[in-house]
Image (cartoon, rainbow, N blue to C red):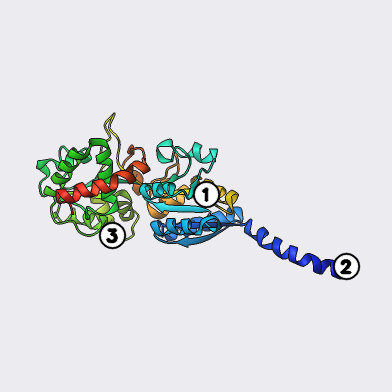
Amino acid sequence: MLRRALLAALPALALALPAAAQDRVMNLYSARHYDTDRALYEEFTRETGIRVRLIEGNADQLIERIRAEGRNSPADVFLTVDAARLARAASAGILAAHGSQVIDQRVPATLRDPGGLWFAVTQRARVLMYDKERGVPAGLTRYEDLAKPEFRGMICVRTGSHPYNTSMAASVLAADGPEATEAWARGVAANLARPPQGGDRDQINALPTGACRIAISNTYYLGGYGRSTNPAERAIFDRTGVIFPNQAPGDRGAHVNISGAGLVATAPNRDNAIRFLEFMTTHKAQEMFALGNMEYPVVEDAPMHPALRSMGTFRGEAVAAQRNLDNTPQALQLMQRAGWN
């Protein structure tokens, strides 16, 4: 009788085991591809016992994958770079409000969705850089100043169609309107020292060679030189100055590119997912982001690499992800029409 009872119970036990195992898992769909992120996931597992199963891919492809998987999607958390892609995920209906007071208390309102669908985990400022040995270009304090005729032949920047630049132009469009933005883009194109080429590091590297006086770049590229053990890269860091644009009282602040995360609406491991999202706002996680990838933390008083701190402090503009998504196609059209290709 006992043997018969045990055999009868086996199917139920077999069904229960996967559910029990599932309690210690969190499935992350990520468009970030950094070794430092993997170290952060390992730290989360050490602290909580919850294993992170990582699925990496292109952000748009991951959004479509979650949509196609529907209610059967294993995805618990969506993590990506660029506010516009977070807005696209929200518009696709794949995100749900996390409802965490911990996140809302730690992350400033300017860096999270008002409805709780996503929040920034890191930020990078899009700044203007110059060669300290040649001095600060006079009259350069705002993005709009890049179009001034006195900067003719001075600017190095990557292609206008790159998301970093279309996002920056979308910010200018929101602030100044289409006519002024097209005039601004035409002025920037006229002020280029060379045709757009390479990545942000290439623009920084051009400064000490005299190829240009002004480089447009994200901060974390220069920050990488600041922590480098390569003497040549460290020398470039020491020689490069940073201007955080649009900092005057009443101005909108420096444009920031964020990485952000959101809870997937159909998350099968919701509690574990929220615990992971909250972990990313802890000082330990923020320090790992900042030290590992030279990104600015989003949590006040979180540790920061000395190289980032030495660049100076700044006020960032509020992240308006949906507005950025809506404005990007028009911003790109205006840039191309103005000759910034």
Q: Residue at x 23, y 47 (%)?
A: 129
Residue at figure coordinates x 64%, y 56% from the top left:
23
Give the Cα distance between marks 2 and 1.
44 Å
**Location of residue 96 in the rendering, given as x and y in whole percent from the top left corner:** 51, 45
Figure quadrant of residue 138: top left
* Residue 131 seen anywhere in this rendered image of the structure: no
What residue is pinned by disc 3?
A: 231
Residue 326 visible in rendering: yes
Going by the numbered disc 3, the residue's amino acid type is: Pro
For marks 2 and 3 on the same chain, the one whose residue lies earlier in the sequence: 2
| Disc 2 + disc 1, Cβ < 8 Å | no
Q: Which residue is mark 1?
A: 265
Mark earlier in primary sequence (1, 3): 3
Q: Which amino acid, mark 2?
A: Leu
- Secondary structure under tag 1 reads loop
Q: How far apart in space, not on screen, are marks 1 and 3 (Cα)?
A: 48 Å
